[in-house]
Image (spheres, rainbow, N blue to C red):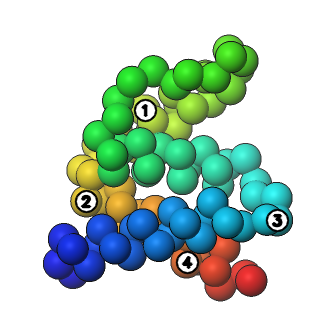
Amino acid sequence: MTNDKLHKEFLESVEHVNNYTEPLPADLLLKLYAYYRIAHKNFDNPGSRTPLINAFKANALIQAKNLTPKQAMKNYIKLVNKEIKDKA
């Protein structure tokens, strides 16, 4: 998959998630969060006002820390296709 095609598909998946109206499980949201942050090379500390949420987000980032941005985009797309689009 070319970088342009991957980036386009990633952006479409992000848009799909952003427009999705049904509630999503917390574990799925945390994985998507980590993949999105890594795909955008954003390694800042989570910025929630709630310490527990920050801890969960930080843990998700730690679990995915060995992914490259390209791998993170692919994982994001795959997860959206499997857990959201296929179940719609």
Kind of residue sitting beneath label 1: Ile
> Can you give x and y, in whole percent of width and height, for residue 86 in the image?
65, 84
Tags 3 and 2 touching, CB below 8 Å: no
Residue placed under numbered mark 2 in the picture: 70
Disc nearer the start of the sequence (4/1): 1
86 to the left or right of 36: right
> In the rendered image, which quarter contains the C terminus?
bottom right
Circle 2 — which element? helix
Marks 4 and 1, how far apart at CA: 23 Å
| Crowd tier of the residue under label 3, counting other residues whose Cα lies within 10 Å: few below 14, some 14–19, many 20 or above | few
Q: Earlier in the sequence, mark 3 or mark 2?
A: 3
Which of the numbered marks, if any, corresponds to residue 22?
3
Q: CA distance from mark 2 to mark 4?
A: 17 Å
Disc 1 crowd rating (10 Å Cα; few below 14, some 14-19, many 20+) is few
Q: Amino acid at mark 2?
A: Lys
| Residue at image coords 76%, 54% | 25
Q: Nearer the viewer, mark 2 or mark 1?
A: 2
Earlier sequence position, callout 2 versus callout 1: 1
Mark identifier at residue 62: 1
**Residue designated by label 4:** 81
Residue 45 is left or right of residue 86, and the answer is left
Above or below 71: residue 5:
below
Q: Are marks 1 and 3 in contact (CB under 8 Å)?
A: no
- Residue 77: numbered disc: none
Classify mark 4: residues with Cα within 10 Å, few (<14), some (14-19) or many (20+).
some
